Image: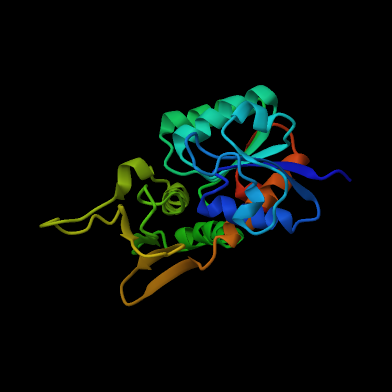
């Protein structure tokens, strides 16, 4: 069976390096191309130098040339870069696994339009554990629909540029949808000063940024006399990389369309 040819966007970044390492260890995957941003000091260098195993593939900013012949592009970059990659992937028929967060509703609509022509797995978090938590939250929200205040607390490293995290928002969307609420209307993203008594229909978010925290998420259901907390803590980016590679394998055997990790893991 032929190997799946993988291209990596942001190959020199934190997630990019972990993806490269895991592709090198996989028997059914092969690195096809490594993308870097224009102006990077690493352009033209063997991408294997980033993890100690030169492979003959050089880091390139030429997206068109890099994606030609690839099966799947894995992209954990920023919305503007991902949308540029999306346009070219759509032209070339290259499927995409997108772990980028911070998209606006209009940008998400662009992803949906492209999914008419290519397969896209788009998820705020590629971790198998986090996606299991999404499923658990559906059950918890149904059982705890009355008499429990819901707060979502997340923590990430100092370099993360968006808040709340895409994963925290995804958790909020699962809870809101299960409760029949619109997250855009019931979310509270910050509290300061005299805020008044808590509105029981709201879903609160609290954000922590510091150090090298990979990613901690807790959904708190606070009732009278008890608290239920559903927590996921990531200690390594490998969990996200392994989930992304699982998504790439999923796309090889499925038609064009928009998918998420619940589809990949068979949780729907």
Residue 180 vs residue 74, the one in the foreground = 74
Relative depth, front residue between 176 and 74: 74
For the point 81% across and 55% down, which residue is it?
27
Outermost residue, top direction?
Answer: 91
Relative to 239, 37 lies left or right: left
Using residue 221 as the reference point, say whether residue 255 is left or right of it.
right
Estimate the x, y position of residue 132 in percent, counting from the top left. Answer: 58, 60
State the residue lying farthest toward the left.
194
| Residue 108 makes an appearance in the image | yes
- Up the image or down, 50 lies above or below 123; here it is below
Q: Please tell me in which quadrant of the rendered image residue 148 appears.
A: bottom left
* 31 w.r.t. 90: above or below: below
Residue found at x 59% / y 61%: 239
Q: Residue 30: x percent and y percent?
A: 76, 47
Image quadrant in which you'd find residue 181: top left
Residue 118 in view of the camera: no
């Amino acid at each position: 069976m032929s190997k799946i040819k993988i291209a990596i966007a942001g190959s020199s970044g934190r997630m990019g390096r972990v993806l490269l390492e895991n592709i090198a260890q996989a028997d059914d995957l092969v690195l096809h191309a490594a993308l870097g941003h224009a102006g990077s000091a690493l352009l033209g260098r063997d991408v294997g130098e980033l993890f100690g195993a030169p492979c003959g593939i050089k880091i390139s900013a030429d997206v068109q040339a890099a994606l030609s012949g690839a099966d799947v592009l894995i992209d954990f970059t920023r919305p503007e870069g991902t949308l540029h990659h999306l346009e070219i992937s759509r032209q070339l028929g290259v499927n995409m696994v997108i772990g980028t967060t911070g998209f606006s509703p209009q940008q998400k609509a662009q992803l949906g339009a492209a999914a008419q022509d290519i397969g896209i797995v788009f998820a705020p978090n590629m971790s198998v554990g986090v996606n299991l938590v999404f499923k658990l939250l559906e059950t918890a929200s149904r059982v705890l629909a009355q008499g429990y205040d819901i707060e979502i607390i997340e923590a990430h490293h100092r370099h993360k540029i968006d808040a709340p995290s895409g994963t925290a928002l995804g958790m909020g969307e699962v809870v809101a949808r299960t409760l029949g609420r619109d997250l855009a209307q019931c979310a509270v993203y910050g509290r300061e000063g005299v805020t008044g008594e808590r509105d029981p229909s709201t879903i609160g978010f609290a954000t922590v940024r510091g150090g090298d925290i990979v990613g901690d998420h807790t959904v708190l259901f606070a009732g009278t006399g008890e608290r239920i907390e559903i927590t996921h803590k990531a200690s390594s980016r490998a969990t996200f990389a392994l989930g992304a590679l699982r998504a790439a394998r999923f796309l090889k055997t499925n038609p064009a369309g928009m998918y998420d990790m619940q589809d990949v893991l068979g949780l729907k």
